[in-house]
Image: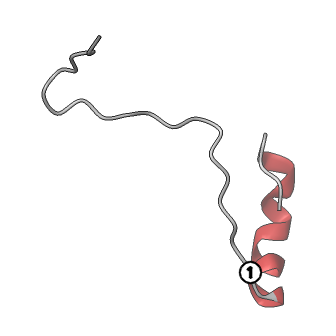
């Protein structure tokens, strides 16, 4: 069985993990925003 997709339709990936390394300076910039972010971990 084949499934047809609309032309130009994109596959949606939910819950994908990304491995990112930040420097201490970059983390210091992000730290004040931590209380405003939901569902993110760093």
Picture coordinates of residue 35, whole percent (x, y): 87, 50
Task: Identify the residue at horizontal 69%, vertical 67% (top origin).
Answer: 19
The color scheme shown is: secondary structure
Q: Quadrant of residue 38?
A: top right
| Dot 1 crowding, Cα within 10 Å, few <14, some 14–19, many 20+ | few
- In the image, taking residue 36 as reference, residue 12 lies left or right, namely left
Q: Mark 1 points at which residue?
A: 22
Does 15 appear above or below 27? above
Looking at this rendering, what residue extends furthest in the top direction? Answer: 1
Q: In this view, does 1 lie to the left or right of 18?
A: left
Q: Where is residue 40 in the image (x, y as percent from the top left)?
A: 77, 49
Which residue is at the front of the view, 24 or 1? 1
- Asked if 23 appears above or below 15 in the picture, the reply is below
What count of labels does the image hold? 1
Task: State the residue at coordinates (80%, 77%).
Answer: 27
Q: In what quadrant of the picture does the N terminus appear?
A: top left
x and y percent of residue 3 in the render?
A: 27, 15
């Amino acid at each position: 069985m084949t499934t047809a997709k609309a032309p130009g339709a994109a596959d949606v990936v939910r819950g994908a993990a990304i491995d990112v390394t930040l420097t201490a300076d970059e983390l210091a910039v992000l730290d004040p925003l931590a209380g405003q972010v939901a569902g993110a971990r760093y």
